């Protein structure tokens, strides 16, 4: 099993198709060193989400290998692979429960103070305290959170999870300038010290990436940092 992961991630000649008769990823190789930020860019349907799905071991490969700290993930129990990741996905996922429960999610040993601290760190504590029931507010159709507030709550959840690897599928929903800044800062905090795979739409994310992978039709057509490309 994986323990105390340093965060080296390697894709070696990965091929994959949701249907094995129709390969979508052809011969994908890439490597991230511990703490590096990998931005994945490319047009819709290029295979960006597929690559992060494979890294999370949501599907089995048709060929090649993905390794974390040198250990092929197909040799590691799925649960143990999932434990290594913080995730912030494109469609913010919240469930019907309190704000606190949504942030703690399945993390053990989290105190109220921990929850409050991450919310302060991502800049959403102030808003939560304006709600009548604060952190105990149950999220449902009656509580109308903005797209930006939802994103900040899922970023707080990812920070609480505190796993060594990060998958970030940047949302494209438009938010106001102030919220945009909060989200940007919260994401920077989340990426710090973690090997991060970011499906990037923001120019600032792309500029700050160590490696940019430009994908098209399941292949990497260019790679390098933003000065090289
Ligand atoms: P976007 O920018 O729109 O999110 P993407 O680069 O993330 O696009 P993927 O979602 O990885 O693209 O899709 C790559 C290809 O795989 C597409 O042709 C898509 O139709 C197909 N695909 C994605 N998910 C599935 C699935 N669950 N079953 C079958 N085919 C799928
Ligand atoms: Mg996608």
Image: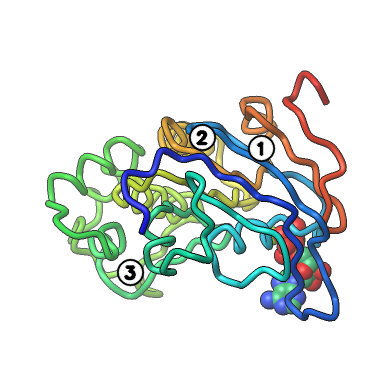
Count every numbered label the image shows and give the total: 3
* 190 up-or-down from 226: above or below: below
Q: Residues within 10 Å of mark 1 (few under 14, many from 20)?
A: few
Q: Are marks 3 and 2 in contact (CB under 8 Å)?
A: no
Q: Are marks 2 and 1 in contact (CB under 8 Å)?
A: yes
Helix, strand or loop under label 3: loop
User: Which badge, 3 or 2, is on the more N-terminal residue?
Assistant: 3
User: Which badge, 3 or 1, is on the more N-terminal residue?
Assistant: 3
The residue wearing badge 1 is 202
Ligand 1 quadrant assignment? bottom right
The residue wearing badge 2 is 184
> Which mark, by number, is residue 23?
none
Q: Position of residue 196 (x, y in %)?
A: 53, 41
Q: Position of residue 175 (x, y in %)?
A: 57, 45
- Left or right: 123 in relation to 40: left
* 186 up-or-down from 138: above or below: above
* 135 up-or-down from 97: above or below: above
Q: Position of residue 167 (x, y in %)?
A: 52, 50
Q: Nearer the viewer, mark 3 or mark 1?
A: 1
The residue depicted at 62 percent of the width and 25 percent of the height is 208
The residue wearing badge 3 is 139
- Left or right: 173 in relation to 112: right
Question: Toward which corner of the image does residue 31 lie, by quadrant?
Answer: top right
Q: Nearer the viewer, residue 104 or 62?
A: 62
């Amino acid at each position: 099993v994986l323990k105390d992961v340093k965060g080296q991630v390697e894709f070696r000649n990965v091929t994959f198709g949701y249907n094995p008769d129709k390969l979508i990823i052809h011969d994908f190789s890439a490597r991230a060193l511990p703490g590096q930020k990998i931005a994945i860019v490319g047009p819709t349907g290029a295979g960006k989400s597929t690559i992060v799905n494979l890294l999370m071991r949501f599907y089995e490969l048709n060929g090649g290998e993905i390794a974390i700290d040198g250990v092929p993930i197909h040799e590691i129990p799925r649960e143990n692979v999932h434990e290594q990741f913080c995730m912030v996905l494109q469609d913010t996922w919240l469930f019907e429960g309190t704000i606190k429960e949504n942030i703690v999610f399945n993390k053990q040993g989290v105190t109220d103070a921990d929850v409050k601290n991450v919310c302060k760190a991502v800049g959403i504590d102030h808003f939560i305290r304006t709600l009548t029931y604060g952190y105990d507010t149950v999220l449902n159709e009656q509580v109308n959170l903005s797209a930006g507030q939802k994103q900040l709550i899922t970023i707080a959840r990812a920070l609480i999870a505190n796993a060594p690897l990060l998958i970030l599928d940047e949302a494209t929903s438009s938010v106001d300038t102030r919220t945009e800044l909060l989200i940007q800062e919260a994401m920077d905090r989340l990426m710090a010290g973690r090997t991060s795979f970011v499906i990037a739409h923001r120019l600032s994310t792309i500029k700050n990436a160590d490696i940019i992978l430009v994908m098209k039709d399941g292949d990497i057509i260019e790679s390098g940092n933003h000065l090289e490309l």
